[in-house]
Each structure stands twice: as structure tokens, then as C-alpha cells.
Image (cartoon, helix red, strand yellow):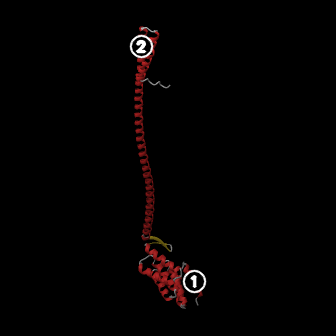
Amino acid sequence: MRRAQPLKLSTLTAALVLVTSALWPMAASAGLFDDEEARKAIVDLRSRFEQSQRAAQTEENERKALAGVVAEQAEQINVLKRSLLDLNGQMETLRTEIAKLRGADEQLAQGNKDLARELADLQRKYKDMVATIDDRIRRLEPQRVSLDGKDAVVDAPEKKAYDEAIGILRKGEFANAATALAAFQKRFPSSAYNGHVQYWLGNALYGKGEVKEAMAIFRTLVTSTPDHPRASEALLALANCQIELKDSKGARKTLEELIANYPQSEAAQSGRERIKQLK
């Protein structure tokens, strides 16, 4: 409900004057009121005027009180606005910090991935390096080999040189094989391969047409190491060389030596067949 507006003091005074003016002609002209009635009218009018003043004062006090409440509320609203602004600023700062932390976390995660990849690369390189070193060590370490059923220990370079020379001989490159085998004898004079090297060197020389040189190699093998596993085969190869040179007498003598000294060998069996074919 809307509150009535208070009457101003000037308005009340004017109203009192009008009322007094209105009463005065009536008293004078009509004689309706005596002094007592006039006094009561004035008292009543004054009482109304005082009530109006008190009502106006009360209204003014209420208006001031309301204005104070409104001002206090406005101040509280301003404080609240300032608090909200501060809070918004803090939230914006927090958002910025969170964004920075997220960026740093992403960089850290990427850095961890890079480190993990680098570590994996290093581990792989380390394994490759260890494998390479182990392979080199194995190549340099003495190795156990089987030579016609007999075990022997040779150095890695010896085995490599021997395998390479035999590989050349198997290809039918007799000249190159003879060179490689002769070089092996000079490089490794005490090698466990030497008896085999002599035997294959004789074959290489025979293959390249140097029959007499081959015969000398075969005879050296039989003379120097008669118990060598290839000695019987060397005698058979020697007899074949003699047959090729038309030395039937020498071939027969060599075959008889073969049969007498190595009767149980496969070479001796072949020698017996050859003797039958000799004239």
C-alpha cells in the first residue's frame, strides 16, 4: 500500500487561516457561537494541527530511517560487488595458473616420452654394442674344432684363414687356393690345421697342373706325420700323380706302401683296385 505524503507546515498554516476566516464571518453574522464554542473550536483545530505535525514528523523520521536503511543496503551491495570483482579476478588468475600448469604437465609428459624413447634407443645401442663385442671376443678366443674325428683347439684367426682357403678351393679356384694355403703355412707354422693344409695344398697344385709339386707336398705329409688322418689319402693321391706321369713302377710301389701301412683305410681299398689296373 502506498504511504500518504506528509503535509508541509506552510500548507497546514494556510488551512488554519482559511478555517478561522470561515468561522469568523459566521460568528459575526449569525451569532451562532459564543466565546466558549469559539475557544473549543480553536482548541480542536490546534489539536488537529499538532496531530498533523506529529504525523508529519513521524513520516519524516520514517523516511530518514528508510533512507538510512537504503543507504546501508546500497553500501552492502557495493561491498558485495567489490567482493565479486575481487573473486572474479582471483578466479581468472586461477584459470591462468591452471592453464600454465596444464601446459607444463603436457611438456613434462612429452619430455617423459622423449626420455623414454632416448632410453630405449640407448638400451638397444648398448645391446648391439655388447653383442658386437661378444662376437669380436668369440672370434679372438681359441675355438675347439674337429679334424677328421679328432678334437683340436685353434685360434680364431687360424680358423678363419683355413675356412677361407678351403672355401676358395671348393670353388675350383686352384691357383688362388694354393696361394691362400701356402700363406696359411707361413702365417701359422705350428697350427693344428697344418697336416690338412698340406693335403689340400697338394690337391690345389694338382688341380692347377703342377703335378710334381703336388707329389712333393703329399710325400712331405706322409713322411713328417705318418699317423695323420689324411696320410693314407696322401699316398693314394701321390700314386695317382705317378700314374699320370706314366710312372707305373713308382705308382705300384706307392700303392703297396699304402696297403701295407694303412690296410684298413678306404684309401687302401682303392689302392688295391688301382694295382690290378696297372700293367
Question: What's the distance in space between the residues labelled 1 and 2, CA to CA?
Answer: 181 Å
**What residue did someone put label 2 on?**
42
Location of residue 15 (image quadrant):
top left
Residue 98 at x, y = what percent? 43, 47
Which quadrant is the C terminus positioned in? bottom right
**Dot 2: element:** helix
Q: Is residue 272 left or right of residue 160?
A: right
Q: Can residue 77 be seen?
A: yes
**Amino acid on which disc 1 is placed:** Arg
Q: Nearer the viewer, residue 182 or 262?
A: 182
Tell me the crowding category of disc 2: few under 14, some 14 to 19, or many 20 or more residues within 10 angstroms, Cα based.
some
Of the two numbered discs 1 and 2 on the same chain, state the one appearing first in sequence: 2
Location of residue 13 (image quadrant):
top left
**What residue did someone put label 1 on?**
272
Name the residue rendered at 42%, 81% in the picture: 186
77 to 123, vertically: above or below = above
Q: Nearer the viewer, residue 43 or 205?
A: 43
Residue 140 at x, y = what percent? 42, 71
Location of residue 56 (image quadrant):
top left
Tag of residue 25: none
Tell me the crowding category of disc 1: few under 14, some 14 to 19, or many 20 or more residues within 10 angstroms, Cα based.
some
267 to 247, vertically: above or below = above
Q: Can residue 226 be seen?
A: no
Residue 137 at x, y = what percent? 42, 68
**Amino acid on which disc 2 is placed:** Ile
**Dot 1: element:** helix
